[in-house]
Image: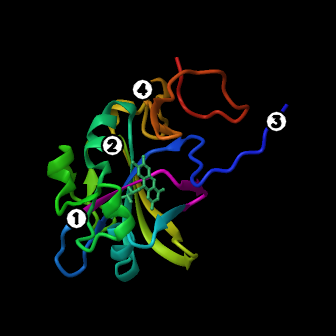
Amino acid sequence: MFKKIEKESFYYGSTVVLMTTKDVQSKADNITVISSTWTLDKTIVVGLGLDNKGFLNLKVGSEATFNVANGNIWEKIERVAKTTGNSEIPTYKRKAGYKYCSDKFSLGGFTKIRGEEVQTVRIKECPIQIETIITDIAIRDSFAIIESKIKGILVDEQILYDDSHIDVNKWDPLIYKFREYISANQSLGTNFRFQEFKK
Ligand SMILES: Cc1cc2nc3c(=O)[nH]c(=O)nc-3n(C[C@H](O)[C@H](O)[C@H](O)COP(=O)(O)O)c2cc1C
């Protein structure tokens, strides 16, 4: 038997990504924790709340880096989770206990690395970093769908088998499942087009 349910948010299980953007005026770097992302070919698509500092930065800037989180940094992420880089905190967020934070790198203990293809910084603690240029912003009621062209993918050598293949045993993407952080590193099998390295 199946039961029809109603839910305001529906986080059935997606990868946690730390989006870095830059304030074009102050040059301050911001981190926006997101999980609504997908990639196809050279494009990454993300869903962003309209009052997030990350979105405000993207509206006037054109670059973003998507730092894909490994399971071992979930506590750092949770440390910045209840903050926003937007100094004008919307009422619903204030009620939920969100605080303004001008430097989430210090708060979470994240290390900045200079961007290679774009100005937005990379996060050292994230083994996969995707540098992008925004190509389209579609506004919906309370969120925007951002389409971004992938300009560069940087991968920590520690999870590489060779120059172009990931050692999948060493990559443990952090999953957000109904607001719980989950490690995804249990192999059930591989797809018929599997192309990476696996012992
Ligand atoms: C694990 C996790 C996933 C999240 N996913 C999203 C998301 O996909 N899109 C979004 O707009 N906010 C998402 N949020 C909420 C934002 O991180 C939150 O609104 C934050 O204050 C935004 O930061 P900013 O205002 O500095 O950009 C997520 C939060 C967490 C902890």
Examine the structure image and report whether residue 99 is included in the region drawn in magenta: no
Q: Crowding near pointer 3: few (<14 within 10 Å), some, many (20+)?
A: few
Residue type at the position of mark 1: Asp
Q: Which residue is mark 1?
A: 29
Task: Select label 2 or label 1 by which is in front.
Answer: 1
Seen from the viewer's position, the closer of residues 156 and 3 is 3
Residue type at numbered disc 2: Cys
Label whose residue precedes the other's in the sequence (1 or 3): 3
The image's mark for residue 170 is 4
Label 4 to label 3, Cα distance in Å? 38 Å
For label 1, being within 8 Å of ligand 1 is answered no
**In the displayed structure, would residue 166 be above or below residue 83?**
above
Instruction: State the separation of the CA atoms marked 4 and 1.
Output: 29 Å
* Residue 20 seen in the current view: no
| Residue 20 horizontal side relative to residue 187, left or right | left
- Above or below residue 74? Residue 38 is below
134 vs 154, left or right, is right
Residue 2: give its label.
3
Residue at 71%, 45% in the rendered image: 5
Dot 2: element: loop
